[in-house]
Amino acid sequence: MARSFVVQQHQATTLHYDFRLEVGGVLRSWAVPKGPSMDPAEKRLAVEVEDHSLAHGSFEGRAGKGGVIIWDRGSYEPLDDEGIEAALAQGKASFRLAGEKLRGAFTLVRTRGNEKKPQWLLIKRRDDEAGENADWPESVVSGKTLEELL
Ligand code: MN
């Protein structure tokens, strides 16, 4: 069954992208400083952060001194036999994204788990969708860049 994912570009103290997967009724979340990449050679640091509500995934707007745009969204299909929750618990989960910008198979691999904020790598897998990143910084909802929103 398809579930939702969303990537929110977030200007807070630092600019980052929040990568969120719907798992068990919440959005499991990772802060990705450089954002996801469609290039399998570019492994992106993804710092696990607290779960967010499903409703938060549709938020776009100013927040504090910064703000958030919905950089991408769509559905995903888990690719591990044991299911996404068990795969994440084991520290390696693969899934196929069907977003507007991000498409195809990705893997999250936990590299440092014994910390308050476990570190993962978000890696594009080699498939027909892999390739260069499009020059497409705007929100997939409003068409605005984060700069235009702020
Ligand atoms: Mn954030």
Image (spheres, rainbow, N blue to C red):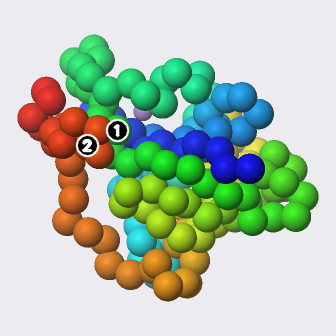
Q: Looking at the image, is mark 2 or mark 1 earlier in the sequence?
A: 1
Residue extending farthest to the left is 148
Q: Residue at label 2?
A: 139
Mark-to-mark CA distance, 2 and 1: 5 Å
Q: Which residue carries the number 1 mark? A: 70
Q: Amino acid at mark 2?
A: Ser
In the image, residue 1 sits, relative to residue 148, either above or below, namely: below
Residue at coordinates 29% horizontally, 45% vertically from top-left? 140
- Which circle marks residue 53 in the picture? none
Residue 69 against residue 126 in the figure, above or below: above
Q: Where residue 75 appears, x then y in whole percent?
A: 56, 50
The residue under label 1 is which amino acid type? Answer: Ile
Q: Residue at x 71, y 39 (%)?
A: 23
**At 39% from the left edge and 24% from the top edge, which residue is drawn?**
59
Instruction: Determine whether, in the image, residue 102 is placed left or right of residue 91.
Output: left
Q: 74 or 32, which lies in front?
A: 74
